[in-house]
Image: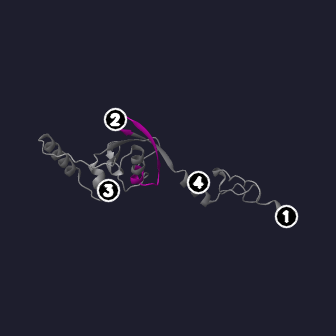
Amino acid sequence: MSKAAGKGKGSPPPPPPPSAAGYGKAGGKAAGKATKSDATVTSSSSAFISLVLRRLTGDEIPVEAQLDGMVDTLRISVGKQLGVSRHRIKLLKEGQVLNNSSTVRESGLEDGNVLTAIILPPVYAALGGAGIKAPDEVIAAKMDLHDALSQAGKLKPIHTATSA
């Protein structure tokens, strides 16, 4: 019987736990010593913070954000949790709108911060999806016009065909 006769039978051993990654086997000169690259992997993989998202309804939703991730990525995550497009979400910290092209860290967010989430009307999703950034004043004027036409009875309902 050869040495390899028993190989390939049974289940493979489980992978090492994540906390042991990069430290090698016990024994030897380098056992237990972390290198600079190990510290980088550990710090970047654990660079998440917990935030509380408060809606105008008073509901509070816990969310996690990566410190080096973009605010826009956080908006995408929040949109998925709330079931709306990211274009309809404005995130505020202490009354200031967060810049979507900044990182979470650059925005000054820290673990435990409470953010306010404002859900904008659906027209923002349609415009944002088309790549159009309309000023808030234009959107407000459009909604005012819609309300006035509706009250005057000048709007016609749009009927869409549905398959039975």
Cα distance in 3D space between marks 2 and 4: 38 Å
Q: Earlier in the sequence, mark 2 or mark 4?
A: 4
> Do tag 2 and tag 1 residues touch (Cβ < 8 Å)?
no
Cα distance in 3D space between marks 1 and 4: 39 Å
Question: Left or right: where does residue 13 sit relative to residue 160?
Answer: right
3 vs 2, front mark: 3
Cα distance in 3D space between marks 2 and 1: 69 Å
The residue that disc 2 covers is: 57
In the image, residue 10 lies in the stretch drawn in magenta: no
Observer able to see residue 106? no
Q: Secondary structure at mark 1?
A: helix
Give the residue type that dot 2 points to: Thr
Start and end of the magenta stretch?
Answer: 54-74
Q: Secondary structure at mark 4?
A: helix
Give the residue type that dot 3 points to: Gly
Q: Earlier in the sequence, mark 1 or mark 3?
A: 1
Cα distance in 3D space between marks 3 and 4: 37 Å
3 vs 4, front mark: 3
Q: Earlier in the sequence, mark 1 or mark 4?
A: 1
The residue lying furthest to the bottom in this view is 2
The residue that disc 1 covers is: 3
Q: Which mark is residue 129?
A: 3
Question: Left or right: where does residue 10 sit relative to residue 78?
Answer: right
2 vs 1, front mark: 1
Q: Earlier in the sequence, mark 2 or mark 1?
A: 1
